[in-house]
Image: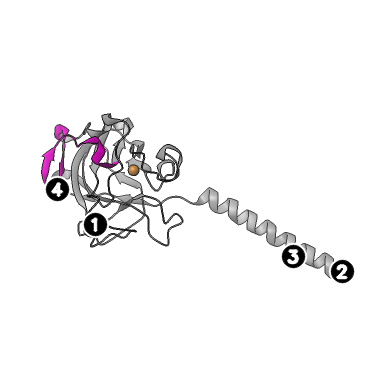
């Protein structure tokens, strides 16, 4: 009888500890953030990448995602909160490793709110792409910024499978935008790229850390 009581007590304690850890970790876990690096003329620079699937050891290794990388595309960090200064020009270089899904809303096939009104795609200045070529969109609705990201060709010789994508085929997209006052702004993708989810807008499309994140203007 005594032994049974002891076993029940130990069992209950273990269950309570596990539930406590689960809730505690859920409440305190924060997605990591990356701070833009200083650039010429008081601007700052972000190097981002989009991948067809997160790293194989990720909690969601099949989900499309944004990553933070560096100019040489060798450092890969799964972060989607970007810290940038207020009233500053932010240069973004984005390495697009995923293939096209296509836009449901063609409005997002044009650049909006970028410095100069356009962006560069593999070194060429453009203002829009064919809607069917869009793989992802980088949009900060509250700042009026949106840029379409052309996917790598479906017959690319060396497509990326999972992050990190160093060495795989990619498109380079660059654009700049201006920050205003301090604040926390949501950014997101608008391409229905969440394959396997209702309308392509579930899973990675509705989860911060994949096709969504924050711009922390400080
Ligand atoms: Cu997307």
**Magenta-colored span:** 116-136
Judged by depth in the image, the label closer to the viewer, 3 or 4, is 4
Q: Which residue is mark 1?
A: 70
Disc 2 to disc 1: CB gap under 8 Å: no
> CA gap, disc 2 to disc 4?
74 Å
- Asked whether the viewer can see residue 214, the reply is yes
- Report if the CB atoms under discs 3 and 4 are less than 8 Å apart: no
Q: Are marks 1 and 3 in contact (CB under 8 Å)?
A: no
List the residue tagged with mark 4: 122
Residue drawn at (40%, 61%) of the image:
56
Secondary structure beneath label 3? helix
Measuring 44% from the left and 45% from the top, which residue is drawn there? Answer: 196
- The reply to whether the residue tagged 3 has its Cβ within 8 angstroms of ligand 1 is no
Q: Nearer the viewer, residue 2 or 99?
A: 99
Under circle 2, the secondary element is: helix
The residues tagged by marks 1 and 3 sit, at their Cα atoms, a distance apart of 49 Å
The residue wearing badge 2 is: 2
Q: Which residue is pictured at 64% across the width and 54% down the height?
A: 19
User: Within 10 angstroms of label 4, few (less than 14), some, or many (20 or more) residues?
Assistant: some
Inter-mark Cα distance, 4 to 1: 17 Å
Q: Quadrant of ligand 1?
A: top left
Query: Mark 2 or mark 4: which comes first in sequence?
Result: 2
Residue at the bottom extreme?
A: 3
Real-space Cα distance between discs 3 and 4?
A: 62 Å
């Amino acid at each position: 009888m005594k032994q049974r009581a002891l076993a029940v007590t130990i069992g209950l304690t273990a269950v309570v500890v596990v539930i406590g850890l689960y809730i505690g970790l859920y409440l305190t876990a924060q997605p990591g953030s990356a701070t833009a690096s200083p650039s010429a003329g008081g601007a700052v620079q972000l190097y981002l990448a989009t991948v067809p699937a997160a790293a194989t050891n990720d909690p969601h290794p099949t989900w499309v995602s944004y990553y933070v990388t560096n100019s040489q595309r060798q450092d890969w960090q799964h972060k989607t909160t970007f810290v940038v200064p207020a009233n500053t020009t932010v240069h973004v270089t984005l390495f697009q490793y995923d293939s096209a899904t296509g836009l449901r809303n063609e409005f997002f096939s044009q650049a909006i709110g970028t410095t100069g009104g356009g962006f560069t795609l593999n070194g060429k200045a453009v203002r829009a792409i064919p809607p069917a070529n869009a793989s992802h969109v980088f949009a900060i609705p509250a700042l009026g910024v949106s840029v379409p990201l052309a996917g790598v060709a479906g017959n690319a010789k060396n497509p990326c499978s999972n992050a990190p994508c160093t060495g795989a085929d990619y498109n380079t997209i660059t654009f700049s935008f201006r920050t205003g006052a301090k604040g926390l702004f949501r950014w997101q993708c608008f391409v229905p790229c969440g394959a396997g989810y209702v309308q392509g807008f579930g899973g990675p499309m509705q989860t911060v850390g994949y096709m969504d994140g924050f711009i922390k203007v400080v």
